[in-house]
Amino acid sequence: MFAEKPTLTGDRVTLCPVGPEHVDGLFELVSDPEVGRLTGSHGEIDREAARQWYATRKDHADRLDLAIMAAGEYVGEIVLNELDQHNLACNLRIALIGERAFGKGYGTEAIELVLDHAFATTPLHRIRLGVYAFNERARHVYKKVGFVEEGVERDALLWDGEWHDAVLMSVLRHEWPARSGSLA
């Protein structure tokens, strides 16, 4: 479903297929302790593992991994993954590189571009995500672009000795055109 790896252009960001040229940005992203907390990512990744990861994403037709670029600089990634072809559903995840990318509208525009693309070019019916309850900034953005809260996974993340809930959200194909103004 995601064999084609497009470049999507907005006013603030350009989304392009990830590749080895984005490894330094990915390494900075996954090395940021705050990004780790917001994504619930335990553990570390080395630069060579990051290079191998990004070098192989183009070979996977069941996922779409895009670098978020602003003014020619890597500021994060957005991914459609966990494809369920039988139920025309997938997961969305996004991570911005940190404070230099937060609050500038990059994430909002990246999500809108990906949803426009997914609903216009694939038969997907449902795109879901999970976000930790403490990540109010992300929850606000997801609601703003049309995701609806569906439920809560209680105590889904153990971080620094404390349990945190995950909020489950989704947007459906028939909801997107009304929300976005697109013609999906």
Image (cartoon, grey):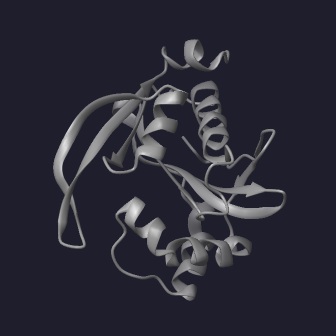
Query: Is 44 located above or below residue 96 in the figure?
Result: below
User: Which residue sits furthest right?
Assistant: 71
Query: Residue 149 location, x and y as percent?
Result: 33, 30
Q: With 14 as the anchor, is 141 left or right in this view?
A: left
Query: Residue 106 location, x and y as percent?
Result: 67, 47
Query: Is 56 located above or below residue 116 in the figure?
Result: below
- Tell me the quarter of the image containing the N terminus: top right
* Residue drawn 52% across the image and 29% down it: 144
* Residue drawn 35% across the image and 34% down it: 169
Compare residues 73 and 78 and report the one nearer the observer: 73
Residue 99 falls in image quadrant:
bottom right
* Residue drawn 69% across the image and 75% down it: 20
- Tell me the quarter of the image containing the C terminus: top right
Q: With 117 as the anchor, is 156 left or right in this view?
A: left
Compare residues 124 and 104 and report the one nearer the observer: 104
Residue 67 falls in image quadrant:
bottom right
Query: Residue 21 location, x and y as percent?
Result: 74, 73
> Disc count in the image?
0
* Residue drawn 53% across the image and 51% down it: 79
Query: Residue 130 location, x and y as percent?
Result: 35, 45
